[in-house]
Amino acid sequence: MIQVTVHSGLQAGQWLTFDEDVVTVGRASDNHVILADSHVSGHHLRIVRGPHRTLIEDLHSTRGTTVIMGDERKRLDEMPNRCVEVDTGCRIEVGTGAELTLIEVRLLESDEARVVSMRRIEEIGVSGENLERDLQILPQLYAAQKRLDAASDLDEVLEATCDGVLQLLPRATHVTVTLRDEEDSSQEPVYVPVVTRERGTDGSGAASRGAIPIARSVFRKVLSERAAVLAADAPREVAQAESIVGASIRSTAAVPLWRGETILGVIQADNRQAPAMLSALDLEILALFASNASLAVSNARLIRRLQIAQEQLRKENDFLRTREETRTRAQPILGESEAMKAVLAQLDKVVDTRVTVLVEGETGTGKELLASAVHYRSKRRHKLFVAQNCAALPENLLESELFGHKRGAFTGAVDDKKGLFDIADGGTLFLDEVAEISLSLQSKLLRVLQEGEVRPVGASRTHWVDVRIVAATNRNLEQEVREGRFREDLYYRLKVFPLRSPALRERREDIPLLAGAFMKRYASELSKTVGGFSQQAMELLVAYDWPGNVRELQNEIQRLVIQLDEGAFVVPELLSERIRSVEGVVGKAGVGKGTLREMMDRVEKYLLIESLREHGNNKTNAAKTLGITREGLHKKLRAHGL
């Protein structure tokens, strides 16, 4: 038993005694010892009494815990695992400095049980002399074992264990199973009573009608001796131990549940009606049944841990998948320009095929958004969309990231690792900046595209995966092939179905739509009300060339929303200097009031005329300066009647 005496603080003079193995101390109402002082944490410390030693453990309190044993003082936040082993009579300072509460802990020992019969774990076999003399026990043992084997859930196993004991020991009236707390991280194992069953009026097992205390002196004997223990007349044999007297136990038999060297728990069978009712034969039967129950309990706990881990993994996968879908689907592909309509029309044709898609375009045009649209509009949308920037990792790390590795394949490979091809199995793998992959790694990527087989680094065998590849690059791959930096065969494997993400200057009519969407998003994130864009500010946004494309526009709008006052409009003075530099061009173009399309047409016509004038009507050079093709220039000249 554990006795706690409070010597100072608001509860000074209070003393409490607990027939528990774990006693918690703190300010919260669910503690065993409640200290109302403000410097005491909600759950400040706990006292853990095991079969071999007693520990004081600080529960990461705010003001700390100091244990005093004789002249020695030990502050627990400076100790390994924040705990220390103590003896009876130790004092504890809860808090520090002038604000502390002093308590004393005493360990009240009952006399050791005078064992009537004891069988150690290593002595428990499949049969014994008593069983050979009493063969009628064997059918009952078989029936109890059969019911135990039929149970799978831990609760069912524990109930079958208790009812099996009541069936095998007709003179037992109560059975309690105590299990080791696997979630507890303290240095001393903690055992918690988890189920008690009592004999019903019809002789079968039934749920207990109330809390049933266990004989802790016998329980500790089982743990310390690693043996099955019988006390035939409990109040006399165990020297009037309070837990036994309080429980009205007249005789008790307790056996361990074990797995290897670990004690999983204890089965305790009691008779509360007459003395000397449980015998040595009962103990041997109970020990034999416990050897099978140990395996059932161990397996059931393992299954429960696996189920919890599987459920946790499922929730994490659902969360990650939902987050990824939200990240991509919350940003729909906005665009009403002819250029974007053409891209989306092409995209819809390829989503439900297995062909490799190559997304080309300048930096910041939304290539990953197109890649994710290929995945989430396809039948693979219920599997993972995995993205990897090939320029972000050196060659050796990228190979391991893509294909995985076996333990010991290289220095630092301490465990097997799955590659992104395995993770994306059944889904889509997006390889951004694919032109940055080294030539040696390109050959391995080509094999995956040709055969669908992946071989992890250090492995001797390949395995098949079903992954759709979407690649992206801002480089001209044809030029990379000509200059020997990219494999020609891989280029043709990747460019089965090319998509070109148009630059923002090629779809200027989408700028107001994109700017409005970005403003709405960032205003919501910052919980700010904004007025919108003034006409002059929008004219400048449309006239600017946006070399950084949609990403540059997004960053500009985010900066503007942060800068705006509540309810204010974006005016030209708030725009970045590089954007305001086109203001003179807009003025020179003679843009007057009108619809946005009319004003854009006037600016575009002016820029076309100026570019041709600067290059002496050389349409090839003018088109190159404007960042469009010669055919595109001819089309725009015809549209403006030039």
Image (cartoon, rainbow, N blue to C red):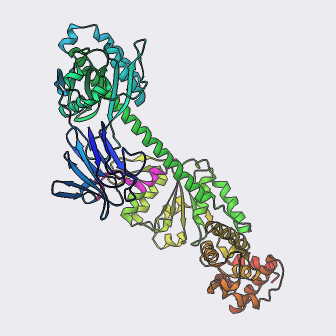
Task: From this view, report whether residue 518 is shown above or below residue 634.
Answer: above
Q: Is residue 116 left or right of residue 543?
A: left
Q: In this view, does 252 lie to the left or right of 391?
A: left
| Residue 41 in view (yes/no) | yes
Q: Give the range drawn in magenta.
A: 402-429
Q: In this view, does 571 lie to the left or right of 279?
A: right
* Of 164 and 328, the residue lying toward us: 164
Residue drawn at x 53%, y 51% as measured from the top left: 319
Give coordinates of residue 253: x percent, y percent.
Answer: 25, 22
Image quadrant for the C terminus? Answer: bottom right
* Of 49 and 138, the residue lying toward us: 49
Residue drawn at x 49%, y 68% as measured from the top left: 435
* Of 490 and 18, the residue lying toward us: 18
Task: From this view, report whether residue 365 is shown above or below residue 264.
Answer: below
Give coordinates of residue 17: x percent, y percent.
Answer: 30, 40
Give coordinates of residue 217: x percent, y percent.
Answer: 23, 31
* Of 107 and 226, the residue lying toward us: 107
